Image: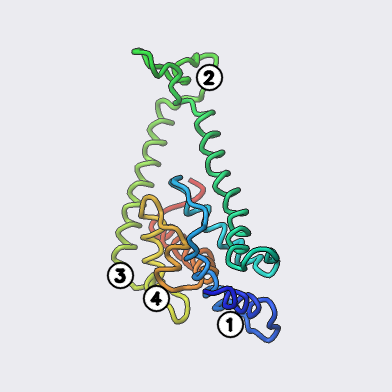
Amino acid sequence: MTDEQFQQAIALICGNMGLTSSERRKAINRLLIALQQLPQLCKSSHPLYFEALDKTWEWVSENICTFQPKPHLSIQRSLVNWINGYLRWRIKDLYQNSQSDQEYSLDVLINENDGNQTRWLDQLSETGFNPPKLSGLDAYLEERRREKNRMIWQRFHNYVTEDPEKRLQNCHPRQHPNCHCQYLCQQLLFQEPPEPLAKISRELGVNYQTLNSHWKNRCLPLLQQILEALGYSRNE
């Protein structure tokens, strides 16, 4: 997009009181697609970078009407700076969380360069730390519970893959039959790491907010119903 086109797109979203909610969503989606092509956006090699990017696009869609271009910069450059200002903090959060997880992990090696490698966990006294231990009947029941959940998950995986009643494939946003719950479940739950929602939105040509709402409000409750029908209970 040119500066003029970006300006027109933002004006359409923010300055047109007669715009219906569906028309506004389409306009935001078109703008987000254009913004995602900007080459100056912050990048990161962090494995969860796309999660930070997803949060950023959600923030942009909610706050685009507060955007104010800088008088000495082009609209495109102003948009990049505005988006990067938020995205950098989300990337920083990723690294801070990673460092925090490592810092307090009991599995961290405390003498990596030594031939006798020791973890913090190895230094804990069994009596001093006093973790609860399962034994006898309790251990047997816990193992049975885990085995039951493994079997339920496997049946759930098979059910989603086959979708015998087409419940998942028939659950999709209007005018987007390819964005059905079976596909989203396979991309977001069965794939490791999960596919970022922003990437799915681009690939399927579905508005990000529509996709996010469909996944949270329709797919997840449906998948919960299927899990419970297969024997899963949250209280176990």
Numbered circle sitting on residue 83: none
Instruction: Estimate the spatial distance between the alpha carbons at disc 3 and disc 1, rounded to whole Å.
Output: 36 Å
Q: Which colour scheme is used?
A: rainbow
First in residue order: circle 4 vs circle 2: 2
Q: Quadrant of residue 161?
A: bottom left
> How many neighbours does mark 3 have within 10 angstroms: few (below 14), some (14-19), or many (20 or more)?
few
Instruction: Estimate the spatial distance between the alpha carbons at disc 3 and disc 4, rounded to whole Å.
Output: 11 Å
In the image, what residue occupies the spot 46% across and 18% down?
110
First in residue order: circle 3 vs circle 4: 3
Residue at which label 2 appears = 130
Which marked residue is nearer to the observer: mark 3 or mark 4? 4
First in residue order: circle 4 vs circle 1: 1
Residue at which label 1 appears = 23
- Where residue 56 sits in the image (x, y, percent)? 57, 58
> How many neighbours does mark 2 have within 10 angstroms: few (below 14), some (14-19), or many (20 or more)?
few
Instruction: Estimate the spatial distance between the alpha carbons at disc 3 and disc 2, rounded to whole Å.
Output: 49 Å
